[in-house]
Image (cartoon, rainbow, N blue to C red):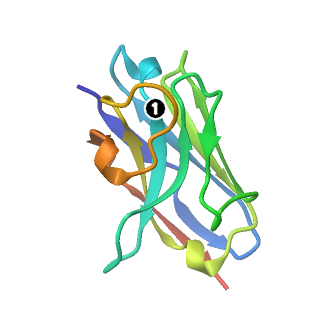
Amino acid sequence: QVQLVESGGGLVQAGGSRRLSCAASGRTFSSYPMGWFRQVLGKERELVAAISWSGGITYYPDSVEGRFTISRDNARNTVHLQMNSLKPEDTAVYYCAAAQSKYGGTARWAYEYDYWGQGTQVTVSS
């Protein structure tokens, strides 16, 4: 069992930066690919970043490529999402997720993730 707790959300002006953190419990955290998703009310949950268990492989969709960076610290059971050059359309609830059943590489689809945090709101004002 893995519990995930996000933090770092809040209000930020367009063009600004924000760093989200996800603290994970569980001794096997370091073996799970991790991801960050976001969701706007009425829309599907969207992957914004994914990272392999070692941190050596990352994936970003075009919408955030070059602006967002995912990283992990397996010794501290944490995953971070550094968000730069934020836009109003980045406004959403951001979720951290762990893919327990995924072996190798990154998990790019919501169905591949077994554990989810409660989410943290990020609001980007124009």
Q: Nearer the viewer, residue 40 or 47?
A: 47
Which residue is at the front of the view, 111 or 90?
111
- Amino acid on which the number 1 mark rests in the picture: Pro
- Residue 46 drawn at (x, y percent): 44, 63
In this rendering, the answer to whether 82 lies above or below 100 is below
Q: Residue 11: x and y, percent?
A: 58, 70
Compared with residue 110, is residue 52 higher up or lower down, i.e. above or below? above
Quadrant location of residue 12?
Answer: bottom right
The residue lying furthest to the bottom in this view is 126
- Residue occupying the point 52% across, 32% down: 105
- In the displayed orientation, state which residue is furthest to the front: 104
Residue shown at 38%/43% (left/top)?
Answer: 97
Task: Give how far across and how far down residue 20 sits, in percent.
Answer: 56, 49
Of 33 and 26, nearer the camera is 33
Residue 35 image position (x, y, % from top left) = 47, 44
Neighbours of disc 1 within 10 Å: few (<14), some (14-19), many (20+): many
Residue at 37% over, 16% down = 28
Kindly give the residue lying farthest to the left in the view shown.
Answer: 1
Q: Is residue 110 left or right of residue 86?
A: left
**Residue found at x 63% / y 33%:** 57
Q: Is residue 38 above or below residue 26?
A: below
Q: How many marks?
A: 1
Which residue does the numbered mark 1 point to in the structure image? Answer: 33
Q: Quadrant of the N terminus?
A: top left
Q: Is residue 82 left or right of residue 47?
A: right
Which quadrant would residue 65 be assigned to in this image?
A: bottom right
User: Callout 1: helix, strand or loop?
Assistant: loop
- Point out the image quarter for the C terminus: bottom right
